[in-house]
Image (tube, grey):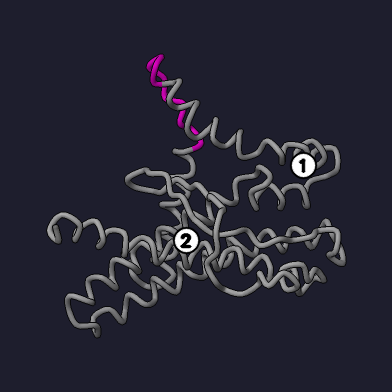
Amino acid sequence: MNQQFGPLLYTISIWALPAIIAITFHEAAHGFVALRFGDDTALRLGREAYRPDGDYCAPGVAASPPFVLFGYAKPVPVNFRALRNPRLDMVWVAAAGPAMNIVLAVIAALLFYLVGYVPDPAGLWVAKNLQNALIINVVLAVFNLLPLPPLDGGRIAVGLLPDVLAAPLARLEPYGMIILIGVLLILPMVGTQFGLDLSVVSRVIAVVTNDVIEAVLWVTGHI
Protein backbone atom coordinates (compact mmCIF):
# COMPACT_ATOMS: atom_id res chain seq x y z
CA MET A 1 0.00 0.00 0.00
CA ASN A 2 2.79 2.43 0.95
CA GLN A 3 4.70 1.53 -2.21
CA GLN A 4 1.60 2.31 -4.25
CA PHE A 5 0.73 5.67 -2.71
CA GLY A 6 4.20 6.85 -1.65
CA PRO A 7 5.28 8.20 -5.08
CA LEU A 8 1.86 9.80 -5.60
CA LEU A 9 1.94 11.57 -2.22
CA TYR A 10 5.50 12.73 -2.91
CA THR A 11 4.50 14.16 -6.28
CA ILE A 12 1.52 15.94 -4.74
CA SER A 13 3.69 17.36 -1.95
CA ILE A 14 6.22 18.93 -4.31
CA TRP A 15 3.55 20.53 -6.50
CA ALA A 16 0.74 21.41 -4.08
CA LEU A 17 2.73 23.58 -1.67
CA PRO A 18 4.33 25.88 -4.28
CA ALA A 19 1.01 26.08 -6.18
CA ILE A 20 -0.95 27.11 -3.07
CA ILE A 21 1.65 29.72 -2.14
CA ALA A 22 1.84 31.10 -5.69
CA ILE A 23 -1.91 31.48 -6.17
CA THR A 24 -2.63 32.70 -2.64
CA PHE A 25 0.04 35.41 -2.75
CA HIS A 26 -1.06 36.37 -6.28
CA GLU A 27 -4.59 37.05 -5.08
CA ALA A 28 -3.48 38.70 -1.85
CA ALA A 29 -1.28 41.11 -3.84
CA HIS A 30 -4.38 42.35 -5.68
CA GLY A 31 -6.12 43.09 -2.38
CA PHE A 32 -3.05 44.73 -0.86
CA VAL A 33 -2.54 47.14 -3.77
CA ALA A 34 -6.29 47.82 -4.06
CA LEU A 35 -6.32 48.84 -0.39
CA ARG A 36 -3.44 51.24 -0.97
CA PHE A 37 -5.42 52.86 -3.80
CA GLY A 38 -8.60 53.28 -1.78
CA ASP A 39 -10.61 50.05 -2.03
CA ASP A 40 -10.98 48.30 1.34
CA THR A 41 -13.42 45.62 0.09
CA ALA A 42 -11.02 42.73 0.70
CA LEU A 43 -10.10 44.05 4.15
CA ARG A 44 -13.74 44.47 5.20
CA LEU A 45 -14.51 40.92 4.06
CA GLY A 46 -11.43 39.54 5.79
CA ARG A 47 -9.94 38.46 2.48
CA GLU A 48 -6.66 40.39 2.29
CA ALA A 49 -4.75 37.93 4.46
CA TYR A 50 -2.20 35.60 2.86
CA ARG A 51 -4.13 32.37 3.31
CA PRO A 52 -5.48 29.71 0.95
CA ASP A 53 -9.23 29.62 0.42
CA GLY A 54 -11.63 27.84 -1.89
CA ASP A 55 -13.09 27.92 -5.47
CA TYR A 56 -11.01 29.77 -8.08
CA CYS A 57 -9.51 27.92 -11.04
CA ALA A 58 -6.55 29.49 -12.82
CA PRO A 59 -5.37 27.51 -15.84
CA GLY A 60 -1.88 28.04 -17.18
CA VAL A 61 0.33 26.33 -19.72
CA ALA A 62 3.78 25.37 -18.49
CA ALA A 63 6.97 25.49 -20.42
CA SER A 64 8.34 22.00 -20.94
CA PRO A 65 6.68 19.58 -21.05
CA PRO A 66 3.40 21.39 -21.76
CA PHE A 67 0.66 20.79 -19.24
CA VAL A 68 -2.36 22.56 -17.83
CA LEU A 69 -2.03 23.80 -14.27
CA PHE A 70 -5.11 24.38 -12.15
CA GLY A 71 -4.76 26.54 -9.09
CA TYR A 72 -7.16 26.59 -6.16
CA ALA A 73 -7.70 29.89 -4.38
CA LYS A 74 -10.59 32.27 -3.93
CA PRO A 75 -10.12 35.51 -5.90
CA VAL A 76 -9.75 38.62 -3.77
CA PRO A 77 -12.74 40.92 -4.35
CA VAL A 78 -11.85 44.33 -5.76
CA ASN A 79 -14.35 47.14 -6.28
CA PHE A 80 -12.67 49.15 -9.03
CA ARG A 81 -15.17 52.00 -8.63
CA ALA A 82 -13.88 52.54 -5.09
CA LEU A 83 -10.36 53.25 -6.35
CA ARG A 84 -9.27 56.88 -6.31
CA ASN A 85 -8.52 56.84 -10.04
CA PRO A 86 -10.42 53.75 -11.21
CA ARG A 87 -9.01 53.35 -14.70
CA LEU A 88 -5.34 53.96 -13.91
CA ASP A 89 -5.40 52.33 -10.48
CA MET A 90 -7.00 49.24 -12.02
CA VAL A 91 -3.78 48.77 -13.99
CA TRP A 92 -1.68 48.73 -10.81
CA VAL A 93 -4.09 46.40 -9.01
CA ALA A 94 -4.15 43.97 -11.94
CA ALA A 95 -0.37 44.08 -12.39
CA ALA A 96 0.22 43.32 -8.70
CA GLY A 97 -0.67 39.63 -9.06
CA PRO A 98 1.77 38.74 -11.86
CA ALA A 99 4.42 40.99 -10.28
CA MET A 100 4.09 39.04 -7.03
CA ASN A 101 4.55 35.78 -8.92
CA ILE A 102 7.76 37.05 -10.54
CA VAL A 103 9.05 38.12 -7.12
CA LEU A 104 8.24 34.66 -5.73
CA ALA A 105 10.01 33.04 -8.71
CA VAL A 106 13.13 35.10 -8.01
CA ILE A 107 12.98 34.20 -4.31
CA ALA A 108 12.67 30.50 -5.19
CA ALA A 109 15.69 30.74 -7.48
CA LEU A 110 17.74 32.50 -4.79
CA LEU A 111 16.79 29.89 -2.18
CA PHE A 112 18.39 27.24 -4.38
CA TYR A 113 21.71 28.42 -2.99
CA LEU A 114 20.68 27.21 0.47
CA VAL A 115 19.58 23.71 -0.56
CA GLY A 116 23.07 22.36 -0.01
CA TYR A 117 22.75 23.10 3.69
CA VAL A 118 19.64 20.90 4.02
CA PRO A 119 20.43 17.23 4.76
CA ASP A 120 19.11 14.50 2.46
CA PRO A 121 16.45 13.32 1.78
CA ALA A 122 14.82 16.59 2.87
CA GLY A 123 17.24 18.51 0.64
CA LEU A 124 15.94 16.83 -2.50
CA TRP A 125 12.33 17.52 -1.46
CA VAL A 126 13.14 21.20 -0.83
CA ALA A 127 14.96 21.45 -4.18
CA LYS A 128 11.96 19.98 -6.04
CA ASN A 129 9.60 22.41 -4.28
CA LEU A 130 11.78 25.36 -5.23
CA GLN A 131 12.12 24.17 -8.82
CA ASN A 132 8.34 23.77 -9.11
CA ALA A 133 7.77 27.10 -7.37
CA LEU A 134 9.90 28.78 -10.04
CA ILE A 135 7.93 27.12 -12.85
CA ILE A 136 4.47 27.63 -11.35
CA ASN A 137 5.01 31.30 -10.51
CA VAL A 138 6.32 32.14 -13.97
CA VAL A 139 3.48 30.20 -15.62
CA LEU A 140 0.89 32.07 -13.55
CA ALA A 141 2.49 35.43 -14.30
CA VAL A 142 2.70 34.83 -18.05
CA PHE A 143 -0.76 33.28 -18.34
CA ASN A 144 -2.45 36.02 -16.33
CA LEU A 145 -0.85 38.68 -18.53
CA LEU A 146 -2.74 37.48 -21.61
CA PRO A 147 -4.62 40.58 -22.84
CA LEU A 148 -8.11 39.23 -22.30
CA PRO A 149 -10.44 40.15 -19.42
CA PRO A 150 -10.97 38.90 -16.75
CA LEU A 151 -7.27 38.01 -16.71
CA ASP A 152 -4.93 40.63 -15.29
CA GLY A 153 -3.46 41.36 -18.70
CA GLY A 154 -6.91 42.13 -20.05
CA ARG A 155 -7.61 44.61 -17.27
CA ILE A 156 -4.21 46.21 -17.77
CA ALA A 157 -4.99 46.56 -21.48
CA VAL A 158 -8.42 48.06 -20.74
CA GLY A 159 -6.80 50.60 -18.44
CA LEU A 160 -4.08 51.63 -20.90
CA LEU A 161 -5.75 51.44 -24.32
CA PRO A 162 -7.74 54.34 -25.79
CA ASP A 163 -11.51 54.14 -25.32
CA VAL A 164 -12.14 53.04 -28.90
CA LEU A 165 -10.19 49.81 -28.17
CA ALA A 166 -10.70 49.51 -24.41
CA ALA A 167 -14.52 49.53 -24.54
CA PRO A 168 -15.01 46.49 -26.82
CA LEU A 169 -12.24 44.62 -24.97
CA ALA A 170 -13.92 45.28 -21.62
CA ARG A 171 -17.20 43.92 -22.99
CA LEU A 172 -15.51 40.54 -23.52
CA GLU A 173 -15.01 40.01 -19.77
CA PRO A 174 -18.15 37.84 -19.19
CA TYR A 175 -16.97 35.54 -21.98
CA GLY A 176 -13.23 35.64 -21.28
CA MET A 177 -12.87 32.25 -19.61
CA ILE A 178 -15.01 30.59 -22.29
CA ILE A 179 -12.80 32.13 -24.98
CA LEU A 180 -9.67 30.91 -23.17
CA ILE A 181 -11.00 27.36 -22.86
CA GLY A 182 -11.87 27.43 -26.53
CA VAL A 183 -8.47 28.74 -27.62
CA LEU A 184 -6.34 26.63 -25.27
CA LEU A 185 -8.25 23.34 -25.22
CA ILE A 186 -11.07 22.98 -27.74
CA LEU A 187 -9.44 24.60 -30.79
CA PRO A 188 -6.26 22.44 -30.59
CA MET A 189 -8.40 19.28 -30.22
CA VAL A 190 -10.45 20.25 -33.27
CA GLY A 191 -7.25 21.00 -35.16
CA THR A 192 -5.86 17.52 -34.53
CA GLN A 193 -8.91 16.04 -36.25
CA PHE A 194 -7.88 17.84 -39.44
CA GLY A 195 -4.15 17.38 -39.04
CA LEU A 196 -3.64 21.03 -38.09
CA ASP A 197 -1.67 22.49 -35.20
CA LEU A 198 -3.95 25.17 -33.76
CA SER A 199 -2.25 25.38 -30.36
CA VAL A 200 -0.67 28.71 -31.28
CA VAL A 201 -1.52 30.50 -28.02
CA SER A 202 -0.24 27.59 -25.91
CA ARG A 203 3.04 27.59 -27.81
CA VAL A 204 3.44 31.34 -27.41
CA ILE A 205 2.84 31.01 -23.66
CA ALA A 206 5.35 28.16 -23.49
CA VAL A 207 8.03 30.16 -25.34
CA VAL A 208 7.53 33.27 -23.21
CA THR A 209 7.48 31.16 -20.04
CA ASN A 210 10.79 29.53 -20.97
CA ASP A 211 12.31 32.94 -21.74
CA VAL A 212 11.16 34.39 -18.40
CA ILE A 213 12.47 31.36 -16.48
CA GLU A 214 15.84 31.75 -18.19
CA ALA A 215 15.82 35.47 -17.34
CA VAL A 216 15.11 34.72 -13.66
CA LEU A 217 17.90 32.14 -13.59
CA TRP A 218 20.27 34.61 -15.25
CA VAL A 219 19.39 37.44 -12.84
CA THR A 220 19.93 35.13 -9.86
CA GLY A 221 23.27 33.89 -11.18
CA HIS A 222 22.33 30.31 -12.09
CA ILE A 223 23.24 30.67 -15.79
Q: Is residue 190 left or right of residue 25?
A: left
Image quadrant where residue 123 sits: bottom left
Residue furthest to the bottom: 117
Q: Quadrant of the C terminus?
A: bottom left
Image quadrant where residue 82 sits: bottom right
User: Residue at 48% of width from left, 70% of height from top?
Assistant: 104
Mark 2 is surrounded, within 10 Å at the Cα level, by few (under 14), some (14 to 19) or many (20 or more) other residues, namely many
Whether residue 197 appears in magenta in the rendering, the answer is yes
List x then y, in percent, for residue 189: 43, 25
Residue position marked by numbered label 1 in the rendering: 170
Q: Of helix, strand and loop, which mostly describes the magenta segment? A: loop
Mark 1 is surrounded, within 10 Å at the Cα level, by few (under 14), some (14 to 19) or many (20 or more) other residues, namely some
* Nearer to me, 167 or 46: 46
List x then y, in percent, for residue 191: 44, 21
List x then y, in percent, for residue 32: 68, 72
Residue position marked by numbered label 2 in the rendering: 137
User: Residue at 58% of width from left, 51% of height from top?
Assistant: 144
Q: Amino acid at mark 2?
A: Asn
Whether residue 11 appears in magenta in the rendering, the answer is no
